[in-house]
Amino acid sequence: MQHSDDLPLGVLPQRERESEARAVVFVEVLRLLLVVGGVIGGLQVGDDLGKNTSAPVIGITLGALIAYVIGGIVGRLLSRGMRQGVARLRRMPAGEVFAASVVGTTGLLLGLVAGLPVIALVHSSVDYPLVAAFAWVLCGFGVQLGVSKGREIVKAAGLSHLVERAGDPPPSTAFLVDTSAMLDRHLLVLGQAGLLAGGIVLPRFVVDEVRTLAEGPDPVSSRRARRGLEAMEALREAGTEVRTSEEEVPQFDDTADRALALAHRLHVRLATCSSELAKRAIDDGVQVVDLRRLPTELTPDHPVGERLVVDLVKEGRQPRQAVGYLPDGDMVVVNDASHLVGRSQIEVVVSSSRQTSQGLLVFAHLFDGGPSALAGDASTD
């Protein structure tokens, strides 16, 4: 099978022909500028060696040949590097094109301005083509910079309205939602609280999987899927930007793998309720938020020595322990308080706490001078 690199130019795809044409133009313009500089430099060297001899002709010839070879090598290397950078960019909205032209022009002007001191100090004819070549390289670099970082550059310049277009890549603060996150209610809560400023991205394959579950025979999965679809509509109505991505990741069959790969491609954060997928995302360098861990991590922290008031409702597993619950549902285990089971508004002091899969578990002891002391005095009497 013949590869595209072995095909003649006439049968190459249109996009490849255009890319090749741009590369040729860049290389030849850079080579021409360097050849002009080589001719001028060779003439000056020849004149210094012998103005009325053949030295100027030899200098011009050697200068042109050396500059021609160097220009071709340097031009191709620079062009190849630029093309590789552009090849990594799969999408180029109008904002990036605008930024590329602005930053490219800025690079060209900076190159010319930077070359003015050289022209003023050296006083040589060879300075002009060399400065032009330097400005041309900065222009090419500016174009690549504008293409890759166009959104950030234009926004920093206060021209955000020029880059906010339909079909633009989502901002890096957006969440790409996998199936497990779409079936969960955490996103709806975060959106209603205004904590999804970057919006969310719904891959089409995730939406299709959730719709399939909604129409499936399992009543529990079907109910959760319908609730997830309704939650996305509720987020839209609440003002959260919900983008549907039509991009596919055909190299993976599993939806979770495809969501992870797409989050990496779009440079956005992954929102999931799967601890396994969250670990894989961290290993792959993808920013991830495990929605199932949010309630646990947001649980109030109770430092040692803090006073709490609890209702003791039952005895603990260990002798003389009593168990109570805080208003947020966290369990409090109080030592030496089994005789107070059934009583309310007992003041205790936190001894320690630890996080469990069920929430925060707090260990405490009775506050000195509290009901335990009174109970002790009563028993003495």
Image (tube, rainbow, N blue to C red):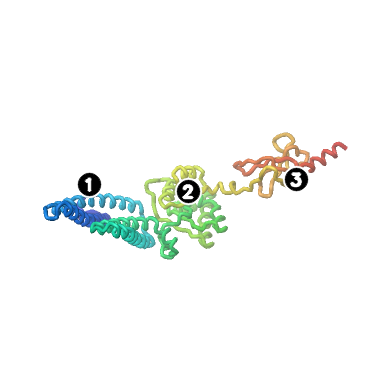
Most distant residue in the left direction: 53
Q: Which type of secondary structure does the marked residue at label 3 adopt?
A: strand
Answer with left or right where residue 226 lies relative to residue 57: right
Give the x, y percent position of residue 363. Answer: 68, 40
Give the x, y percent position of residue 70. Answer: 23, 50
Distance from Cα at disc 3 to Cα at disc 2: 43 Å
Q: Which type of secondary structure does the marked residue at label 1 adopt?
A: loop
Q: What kind of residue is marked 2?
A: Gln
Q: Nearer the viewer, mark 2 or mark 1?
A: 2
Q: Which type of secondary structure does the marked residue at label 2 adopt?
A: loop
Give the x, y percent position of residue 214. Answer: 49, 53
Q: Which residue is mark 1?
A: 2
Q: Is residue 77 visible?
A: yes
Q: What kind of residue is marked 3?
A: Glu
- Crowd tier of the residue under label 1, counting other residues whose Cα lies within 10 Å: few below 14, some 14–19, many 20 or above: few
Give the x, y percent position of residue 141. Answer: 33, 55
Q: Which residue is mark 2?
A: 287
Query: Considering only vertical position in the picture, is 117 above or below 351?
Result: below
Most distant residue in the right direction: 381
Residue 56, quarter of picture: bottom left
Count of marks overlaid on the render: 3
Q: Mark 2 touching mark 1, by CB under 8 A?
A: no
Which residue sits at x=55%, y=52%?
186
Q: Nearer the viewer, residue 52 or 277?
A: 52
Q: Is residue 14 visible?
A: no
